[in-house]
Structures are given as structure tokens and as C-alpha cells.
Amino acid sequence: MPAKGVLLAETADVVIAGGGVIGTAIAWRAAAAGLDVLLVDPGRGDAASLVAAGMLAPASEALFGEGELLRLNLLAVRRFGSFAAELEEAAGHPVGVRREGTLAIAYDPGDYVALMRLTAFRRSAGLDAEELDSRACRKLEPFLAPDVHGGVLFAGDWSVDNRRYAAALGEAAQAAKVRVIRDQVLQVNVRAGQARGVRLVEGGDVGSARVVVAAGCWSGSVGGLPQALRGVVRPVKGQLLRLRHPASMPPALTHTIRATVRGTDIYLVPRAGGELIVGATQEERGPDQSVTAGAVHDLLHDAMSVLPVTSELILAETCAGLRPGTPDNGPIVGACGPAGLLLATGHYRNGILMSPVTADAIAAMLTGGPPAPEWEPFTPQRFTTRGRSR
Amino acid sequence: MPAKGVLLAETADVVIAGGGVIGTAIAWRAAAAGLDVLLVDPGRGDAASLVAAGMLAPASEALFGEGELLRLNLLAVRRFGSFAAELEEAAGHPVGVRREGTLAIAYDPGDYVALMRLTAFRRSAGLDAEELDSRACRKLEPFLAPDVHGGVLFAGDWSVDNRRYAAALGEAAQAAKVRVIRDQVLQVNVRAGQARGVRLVEGGDVGSARVVVAAGCWSGSVGGLPQALRGVVRPVKGQLLRLRHPASMPPALTHTIRATVRGTDIYLVPRAGGELIVGATQEERGPDQSVTAGAVHDLLHDAMSVLPVTSELILAETCAGLRPGTPDNGPIVGACGPAGLLLATGHYRNGILMSPVTADAIAAMLTGGPPAPEWEPFTPQRFTTRGRSR
């Protein structure tokens, strides 16, 4: 890997800006398809992918009015299993997919009314959902608080260890001969309506007829993108906690728990290795990544309300990430602006889940295939030509 | 500094086991008195000194039945100012002594009754204490919660930045030619009733006619001490939080706040640099130094109860330390066992506060002076000859 500050005159079949799970998954699949791939990432270790809980949970996350996004997420979770299997083989280690399902919990009667309303909507969208009373919830998860009002089991909602998954993608990409430059893309170079590569922040150019911008919430700051896309992706701050079981303690959970505690949403995601992820806030604070006392308090308080034994766990890490949010909560995937320029960003809360299908879609576009129909609602054009009307 | 594993055949006038604030303050004062001092410390960075809040607060901490300890603590706080001034000169930087005083706060009427009882006792011991109603408390500290019941100002209770103070002691000791070995004392070598130096864990001996054991809660595990002292010092776990103000925010406090929130004690100690320390638990858990979700929640919850703006602060660090507790909560300072062996340990919650007077006392003993009378109740002999009857 060239050192920072070295003037580059590299070329590649495709340059990818951004080494989170989206950019790295694309790099791996494009390289596997025979392309010479160069990935540019500053390596700050602050990718939203590393702060995520890794929920693969389209059913228990489905909201009113997001039907097209739900359809895409359902395709994404169906694709995840085979993609992860291939990835584990390429990387040589498991990525921690858990298939026990997700239990949505309502803490009090008001929370239960809201959960039932959402469950009716999710069933009308064809999703499986099994209603459980408080007793049945505690039969599935004995450490739940006795005063939990009730819940719904979404058996098809999984999770993955986001950090193992991100590491495996990096290893698979490396094994597939993806080259990595530790720098940042300043702008896409364009000549005569055609992308010609990128200019790097530390200096130097990479020549390439195809450029993929997958820089998460920073995607809008890459020069050379259509003006209308500048402010479309915004950072949505999320704080979460990584807890660990003390040596002597049995696992507190086997299912992912999504709970509503007096109107506030929280999730608890168990890992095979004894970790328990608790998240997350959603804050509109610009690029601020500080961990605040109030957020940590509230997350712990709500987690202890539904799972009192949380108090005995070790607080191993507190962290904050910046999700790439969009006006309609949907991703932005496809060609835009000059020929050869592709966007793969705006995955908001579903970057891990959507990384396989996004990599498939972009790899297909890079090798000349037609765009899959499920992506039609999520092209960049919805912001550049139709306005923001969805 | 010799590397670990090198066989040593060093000699010194005095060897000190333990490089927390007690051991390092002794090393500095002994070297300043002309002795050739060798300090042995494993350098794990887990000294209780580094987890402390640095309160110099004998009045607001005085408890029923601890009169001799209170007298010693009052001498300690009076000595602290001149000691810190000399230290700042030796180290070349401030150690962050704050003299604004300590405000004891009662959150609810029950807490207030308890505070008034303690205040009556403290006054009967000759301490200054100014009663303040809720309004007057908030005049001193405008960010306090409006529903705080009342408080008492202890104007003579200070604080110091424990980490700057510990760092300055290390620098002053180095400037005074104290030598440091990164290792651990396995045992005190004794021949014919006289200390002859120490054996190190990594191998090798240091020859010395005087040995000071200042290894905090680990002091009892040093070989060669009288059997009766083995279990006398125990680790008392304390968890605390280091918060930071965001750039745009004015300081939340100027006084140290000691609050009782529905029967639970908490303190908030402001630093000049914009830090706010929140502590602390007191847990009998042996040598466990893990940070637990429950403790962090409870500290944040109580801090936010008395100072709601705490929620806006950045949670910079969570940590746990092991205080050296003793059966009567008093320190263990003085000669014991073989000639030339001195103990300086068991300072429990007052290690920072007592480090100057302890260093004075031990340096005097090392240079042949008589023990000061205020130390008479705190000799090791109260555990070896009189039993544990105090």
C-alpha cells in the first residue's frame, strides 16, 4: 500500500471511494467478476459499519409507508445467507450470523397497542409474526423482566456480527486482489461527460473509466457529483453500547430483542462470543461523534427495564457512528451524472443488511448488466430529476 | 531503566515497593532528604491513584466514630497546599488544586435529615459548615436541579487533579534522581531480624537496609511481612466516570458537589480543564476491576438527578480502581516486623489527600526522626499486637 503523500499515477478498471461494508463488498464482488479494483479509504476506523448492531431484520423494522424499502430489505435478508457463506469461505472464518429470530417486546400497555398496530401492518405486507403473551416471551427469554407486557416473534429476522463481517469483507477483497489506498477522494475527475478517475486529498490522481462513490454520510462532499445530490445524504448520529458477560455468567439472551419502553425504541443483540449490543440513539447533530452521558444513561436504563440482568454485564465500549440518512430513508444506488459514475450510499440503518444486494447490483452495472427492477425506486435520479417527491 | 528479566544486583539506601501517589511521594521526599532511592513498580497503570476524584475533603467526608482519622485528614489538607506548591515548582506545571470549597447536597427531605445529623456532628468536631437552602445552593451552583432540598457548604474542602498530581510526583521524583524499576516486589529479604532489601518477581535482588511497602491493596501479598498483616488490607472496588464539556458549553460546576440522592452518595468534582469526575461505587468484589453497566447507569442517574445538564456532557472514560481498605478505615503507616521495614498503605479513600503527610512521616522515619504523634493510632502494631480492637 503506498504511503500517504506519495504522488500517484495509478490506473484501475474501477475506483471505489469508501471502505465501509458497502464499498468493500462492492470491491470484493467486482474483483471476483474479473475487474481490477482500487479502493480508496482514509482508514480512520470511523465507518458507520463498525458501530452497527448488525441486525438483519426487515420484518421487525418495517414501518408504515415504506413498502418499496421493505421489499428491498426482504430481498436483502434472503440474499444474506448465501453471500455470508461465500464470504466465510473466502475469509476463512465465521462472521457470526445468528438465525434465532427477533422478539419484539412491548414494555407497557401503551407500547403494546403500538406494537399491535405495527404487527397488523406487517402481516398485511405478508410478513410472519407470532403474537406472544408475557409468559410466552419469558419462556423464550427467561431473563426478560416479569412486567414486560407482551411481544411478537419475527422468526425470519436475523443478525450478524458487524465487525467480523466487515473484517471478513476486507480479507476477501484482499484475497481477490483489490488494492487499497489509505487516502480520501477529493473529487471525481470528469472529461467530456465521462468519468476519468479521481483526485485524492493527499495529492495524486487515479485514472479509471468507472468510479463508485460509497462514502456513507460523507458521499455528498465528493467533488464532481451532480449539484442536486450535495445535501441529500446527511449524518444521523447513533450511539450504542457493547456489553460483555462476566466469565461466570450464562448468556442473557439468545434472540435479538427489539423493545419499546414507554414509547422509546431500543434493541439488544446477542453475539455468539458473549457480547451484547445495546442501541441506539437517532440524533440529528451533524457530524458530531461524541458519546454523551445522557444517551448512555438512557440506553442502559431502557435495557435494564426489559432485561434487568443487563446491570451485571461489563460495559466494554461506548461508541457513536454516523449513518448515511436520506430524505425518504431509502438507499441511493445507481448511475448518475457523468458516464461511468455510480453511487452506492444512503443506506441509513440498513447498510449491513443491504451490502450483499448492493454489491450484486453495482457489480452487475460495472460489468454491463441491466439494473435489477427492485432498485428502480432507489436510483439517484429520484433526487436529481423528480425532485424529492417520494 | 533496566529491562524486565535482567538479573539485578542493585543496591540503594531505600527501596520502595509501589509507585502510586503514596510510594512516589515518599520516594521524592526521601530523595530530597538526600537518600538514594529505588522505586519498584510494575507500571500497569492501574494504581488506585489514577482512578480517584482527588477530593481533599476531610470535613464533608467526616463520619461518626472516626475522630482520629478526621484529625489526621485535617492535618493532611492543611499540609496539602504547601506540598503542592513545592511539587509544582519541582515538576514545572500546575497540579490543578481547586479551593472553591465543597457543597454537600441533600436531594430529598430524608437525605436532608441525614445531612443535618452529620453536620451537627461535624460542627461538634470544630468544623466550619454553612447551611444553605435550595435557593442559596442554586445561587452558588446555578445548574443544580430545582428540586434539590438543601445543602451545606464546607469552604475548606478542596480538590486536586489526581492525574496531574500523580504525573507531577513522578516528574519530581525523577528530577530528584529516584531510580525506577518496572517490576514487582516478590518479598522483603530479611536476615537476622533486619531487612536486607527485596527480591523481584522477574528475578534479581536489590540490596537495601530500608524497605517501604506502599503497594496499595496488594501490600499484603508482599512476602516477608508479619503474618498478621496479610489479610488486613483488602481491595475495595470503586467505579467512576470522567465526563467532558462539549466545546460550546460553560462549566457546569465550580464547587465540588457531594450529594445524597435518596440515600445514595455521589460526588461531582470539576476540573479546571473542563473535566467533571462523577463517582463512585464502593464494592467488596475482591480484585475485580471491570466496569459494569449497572454502576455506570446508577452514577449517571444520580448525577443527572442533582445536575440535569450532566446528560449533555461527553462520557470520556469509565474506569474502576481498587482502594486499599482496612478494618478501621484508617491508614497503616510505620515500622513493623524486621528492623528497617516500613509500611505506608491502607489509605482507602484518602490516598491523594494523605500522600503529603505520609511522605513527610516516612521520610522522617527513614532519616532517623521520631514518629509524629498524630500517627500513633495508625501504626501497623494495632493489627499485630493489639488485635483489631479499635
Image: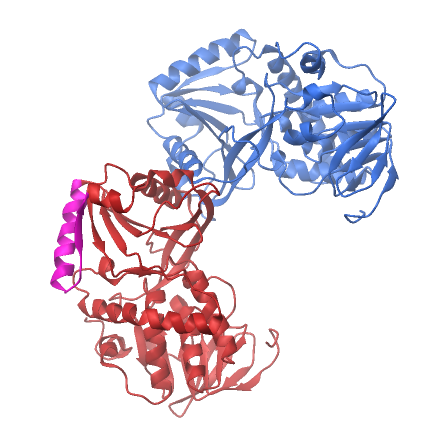
Chain colours: A blue, B red
Residue at image x 34%, y 28%? A146
Quarter holding residue B27: bottom left
Quarter holding residue A7: top right
> Relative to B390, is A287 above or below?
above
Magenta-colored span:
B109-133
- The answer to whether residue B230 of the structure is visible from this angle is no
> Relative to A145, is B12 above or below?
below
Where does residue A340 sit, x and y in percent of width and height? 83, 23
* Residue that sits furthest to the top in the current view: A124
Where does residue A31 sit, x and y in percent of width and height? 82, 32
Main SS, magenta region, reads helix
- Nearest the camera: B279 or A172? B279
Does the segment drawn in magenta span residue B117?
A: yes
- Nearest the camera: A96 or B75? B75
> Relative to B317, is B199 above or below?
below
Quarter holding residue B144: top left
Where does residue A56 sit, x and y in percent of width and height? 59, 25
Residue at image x 87%, y 39%? A10
